[in-house]
C-alpha cells in the first residue's frame, strides 16, 4: 500500500483505537499525512495513544457525554472542521438468539449502533457546513449475511447498514459521502474480546444450546486465533483509504475472500439455499 502523504493534512476521528483495525488505521493514516484524532474507551488506552504521539481522546460509544466531549475536543483543536470520521469501535456479542437477555441486546446496540449514530449525528452538520466530508462505517460480512450464534452482532451491523444506506440517500448533493467497509475475518483482539463478553453474559448451563456452546469453546481453544482466509488489519485500512480519497467513494468496500463470496451468494441464491450454506458455517 502506498503511503504518499496527503497535503494539506486532513483531519480524521477514529473510534476504537486501543487495538486491531482502529489502531492500525490510526498508524497508517498518520503516516499518510492525516491529522489523526485517535479515540479509545479506556483511560489507560488514551494515555498509551498519547505516549505514541497521537492527539488522543476518550470516547466511549456507550456514553453520550463522552461522545459529546470527544467531538468538542476535536472541533476545538481543528477550529471547527473535520474531514473524516471512521466509525470503527464495536464488539461482538456471541450467543444464540434465544439466550440473549434484553439488557444484553441493549448493551450491544448502545455501542455498535446508538453510540455510532450519535457520533455521526454530531459530525454531519460540521461536514455540511464545511462543504464536504467522509463518513466510513466499519460494518462486517455479518452486516450482509447471518450466521448462527451471532444474532446480536448480526442485528447491530444490519442496523448500521440500514442507517448508512438511508443517510447516503439523504446526503445526496451535500458532498458528504457515507461508505461501509465490510471485512470478513481480520486479525485483531475481536475474538478474544467477544469471548470475554460471552463468558459474562451467556448462561451456558441453562441453555438448550449448551452442548453446542461447549463444542465451540473447545474448537476455538484448539484452533487459536485465526479462521480461514483471515487478513491483517491493514487490508481494511487500504479500503478506508480508498473511501477517504476517491473522488466518488463507493457505498461498500469488501475485504477478504469470505465477504466477496457471501455477498455474491446472497445476490444469486434463493433465501432457503443461502440458509443452507450459512447453517454450515460454525
Ligand atoms: N476482526 C474481525 O474479524 C472483524 C470482522 C468484521 C468486522 N469487524 C469490525 O471491525 C471493527 C474493529 O474491530 P477489531 O477487529 O479491530 O476488534 P478489536 O481489536 O476488538 O477492536 C475493537 C475496538 O472497539 C472498541 N470498543 C468496544 N466497545 C467500545 C465502546 N463502547 N466505545 C468505544 N470503543 C469501543 C474496543 O475498545 P476496548 O479495547 O476498550 O474494548 C477496541 O478498540 C469493529 O467494528 C468490528 O465489528 C471486525
Image: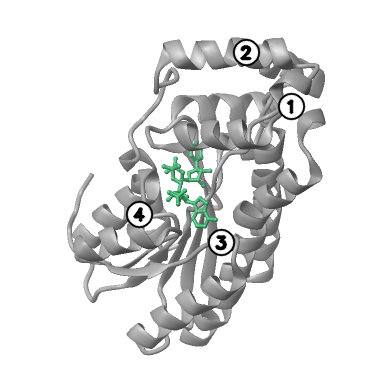
Asked if the beta carbon under badge 3 is closer than 8 A to the nearest atom of ligand 1, the reply is yes
Q: Is the CB of mark 4 within 8 Å of ligand 1?
A: no
Query: What residue sits 76% from the left and 48% below the top?
Result: 103
Q: Residues within 10 Å of mark 2 (few under 14, many from 20)?
A: few
Mark 1 Cα-neighbour bin, 10 Å: few <14, some 14–19, many ≥20: some
Q: Which residue is mark 1?
A: 96
Crowding near pointer 3: few (<14 within 10 Å), some, many (20+)?
many
Q: Residue at x 73, y 51 (%)?
A: 106
Quadrant in which the N terminus appears: top left
> Rounded to the nearest whole Å, what is the CA distance between mark 4 and mark 1?
35 Å
Q: Is residue 266 left or right of residue 98?
A: left
Badge nearest the viewer, 4 or 1: 1
Mark 3 or mark 2, earlier in chain: 3
User: How was the colour assigned to the protein in this rendering?
Assistant: one colour
What residue does disc 4 label? Answer: 241
Say if residue 247 shows up in the picture.
yes
Tell me which residue sits at (24%, 61%) in the image. 30
Mark 3 near mark 4, Cβ–Cβ under 8 Å? Answer: no
Which residue is the site of mark 2?
A: 214
Contact, mark 3 vs mark 1 (Cβ under 8 Å): no
Compared across the picture, whether 33 is left or right of 208 comes to: left
Contact (Cβ within 8 Å) of mark 4 with mark 1: no
Could you tell me how far apart the alpha carbons at marks 2 and 4 are, in whole angstroms? 40 Å
Residue 48 on image: x %, y %: 26, 58
**Which type of secondary structure does the marked residue at label 1 adopt?**
loop
Amino acid at each position: 500500500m502506498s503511503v504518499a502523504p496527503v497535503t494539506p493534512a486532513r483531519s480524521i476521528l477514529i473510534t476504537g483505537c486501543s487495538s486491531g483495525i482502529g489502531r492500525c488505521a490510526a498508524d497508517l493514516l498518520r503516516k499518510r499525512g492525516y491529522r489523526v484524532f485517535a479515540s479509545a474507551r479506556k483511560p489507560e488506552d488514551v494515555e498509551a495513544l498519547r505516549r505514541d504521539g497521537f492527539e488522543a481522546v476518550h470516547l466511549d460509544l456507550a456514553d453520550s457525554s463522552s461522545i459529546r466531549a470527544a467531538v468538542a475536543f476535536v472541533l476545538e483543536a481543528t477550529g471547527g472542521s473535520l474531514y473524516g470520521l471512521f466509525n470503527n469501535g464495536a464488539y461482538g456479542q456471541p450467543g444464540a438468539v434465544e439466550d440473549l437477555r434484553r439488557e444484553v441486546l441493549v448493551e450491544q446496540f448502545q455501542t455498535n449502533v446508538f453510540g455510532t449514530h450519535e457520533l455521526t449525528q454530531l459530525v454531519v452538520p460540521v461536514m455540511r457546513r464545511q462543504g464536504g466530508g467522509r463518513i466510513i462505517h466499519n460494518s462486517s460480512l455479518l452486516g450482509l449475511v447471518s450466521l448462527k450464534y451471532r444474532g446480536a452482532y448480526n442485528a447491530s451491523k444490519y442496523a448500521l447498514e440500514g442507517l448508512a444506506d438511508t443517510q447516503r440517500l439523504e446526503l445526496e448533493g451535500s458532498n458528504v459521502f457515507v461508505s461501509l467497509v465490510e471485512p470478513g475475518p481480520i486479525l485483531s483482539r475481536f475474538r478474544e474480546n467477544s469471548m470475554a463478553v460471552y463468558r459474562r453474559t451467556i448462561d451456558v448451563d441453562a441453555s438448550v444450546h449448551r452442548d453446542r456452546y461447549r463444542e465451540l469453546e473447545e474448537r476455538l481453544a484448539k484452533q487459536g486465533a485465526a479462521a480461514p482466509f483471515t487478513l491483517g488489519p491493514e487490508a481494511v485500512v487500504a479500503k478506508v483509504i480508498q473511501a477517504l480519497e476517491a473522488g466518488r467513494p463507493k457505498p461498500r468496500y469488501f475485504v477478504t475472500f469470505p465477504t466477496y463470496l457471501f455477498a455474491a451468494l446472497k445476490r444469486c441464491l434463493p433465501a432457503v439455499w443461502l440458509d443452507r450454506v450459512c447453517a454450515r458455517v460454525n
